[in-house]
Image (cartoon, helix red, strand yellow):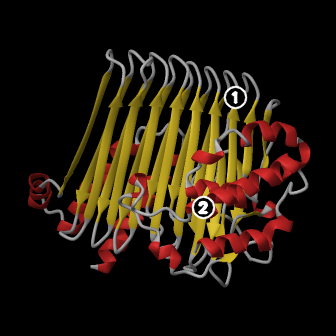
Amino acid sequence: MTDAFTDHFGALRDHFPGQDLPWLAELRDRGLQRFAESGLPTPRLESWKYTSLRPIEKVDFAATGVPRACVSIDQAPSLLPDHTDCHRLVFVDGHLRRDLSQLGDLPAGAKLLPLSEQLAADPDWLQTHLDRLDDSQLPPMLALNTAMMMNGFVLHLTRGTVLPHPVEVVHLGGAGDAPLAYHPRNLVVLEEGSQATLIEHFSHMGEQAYLSNSMTEASVGAGAILRHYKLQADALNAFHLATVEAEIGRDATYDSFVMTTGARLSRNETSVRLNGEGATCHLNGAYLVRGEQHCDNTTVVDHLVPNTTCREVFKGVIDDKARAVFQGKLKVHRDAQHTNGHQLSKVLLLSDRAEIDAKPELEIYADDVVCSHGATAGDLDHDALFYLRARGIPEAEARAMLIEAFLGESIDQIAAEGLCPALMTSIGHWLADSRREV
């Protein structure tokens, strides 16, 4: 499979935006070299111990190079109510569809545009933000993304800029007549005192297999606030690999929520560096998987300086022969005194064949901290189920009510107006489909 992706690089090289820029061509070449040396990650790597990419190797993915503007779509799906003002970018098979996008009137100091346009407008600014990672330490899929980055978006807010309306980025896959692989590269830069809400929605147009291997770099300056929410509802034949690298400055906040219902195999990997005193991070998530789906949530939070805070809660519902993975590490460095970090994984197993691999970790080198971690797994509360059934509620409906309450507690914490009902509706659809399959 490694050879197939390197072949994609050769086929698309002339189509890459900014390939005439020496620094970018060199960056891509270094990424390809790193990926060629390492290959696809395997369970031999500790961070991939519970997730195998063998299913990806069985699919003959084609390279995506030409925009599929011929695909007919009347309206892209949205997670926000029709009356909600927002700025929207729509990508189909990894390519921007301007006819479906809506940027609206951005305030002064705000910039939202495709990666290719940022390269054309100000490549020097982009270079300072894209070429920051150590090539020798690049994980394999991030190295592949660096080599193949062709599309994606840039969100940049200058000092003190507040974006009053959310930014919604819609990704639609499966539009082609053959399995496609694409590698979006996104960049979010919030300067000191700025604020933004970013909502990503991954959906599909059919059941064609596809691979989305995305990377988002986020820099949150001093006193800035980034709310980053995501619904991954890809096709059940799709493969979804997503990496987020976030750097959080002094008194800044990164608030993240990821909900997963789709994809045959998915992995959301988030790495956060709290490198300013007073920095705060919320990493929360929910997932519902069934059949033979595989869902992996992996997080690493580095507390680098004193007085930083992290709260992390992931809740999951697993049915049939599905499998989920939660790997979370809180690393408190030697100088990071007065760290406050908490991590929790809670799972409902609805089948005897369902599986959860939970690996919460604390790695602490400071001596004045308050940190905790935990993991629980079990069936629905039988007493609560009996209570509901004793009041005339059918068993299927009672089970659905308990599942919605279990996940709804996490969703209620989301700050984006209008998003919570959409996520609860997604849960309702999943439960309705489950009942139809019984």
Q: Position of residue 61 (x, y in %)?
A: 62, 78
Of mark 2 and mark 1, the one earlier in the sequence is 2
Task: Give left or right: position of 105 versus 78.
Answer: right
Quadrant in the rendering for residue 284 = top left
Q: Of 197 and 419, which appears nearest the observer? A: 197
Task: Give left or right: position of 177 versus 253.
Answer: right
Q: Position of residue 437 (x, y in %)?
A: 32, 79
Q: Position of residue 160 (x, y in %)?
A: 72, 22
Asked whether the residues under the numbered discs 2 and 1 touch, taking CB atoms below 8 Å apart as contact, a structural biologist would say: no
Report the quarter where the C terminus lies: bottom left
Point 38% across, 39% down: residue: 329
Point 29% across, 56% down: residue: 357
Q: Of 135 and 95, which appears nearest the observer? A: 135
Image height of 405 relative to 126, above or below = below
- Inspect the image, locate mark 1, and give the three-letter code of the amino acid beneath it: Val
Q: Label 1: which residue?
A: 162
Image height of 196 relative to 36, above or below = above
Residue 37's tag is 2
Q: For mark 1, does the 10 Å Cα neighbourhood hold few (<14), some (14 to 19), or many (20 or more) residues?
A: many
Task: Give left or right: position of 238 versus 20.
Answer: left
Q: Is residue 342 visible in the rendered structure shown here? A: no
Point 33% across, 19% down: residue: 369
Furthest residue toward front: 37
Q: Is residue 88 visible in the rendered structure shown here? A: yes
Image height of 394 relative to 189, above or below = below
Residue 408's tag is none
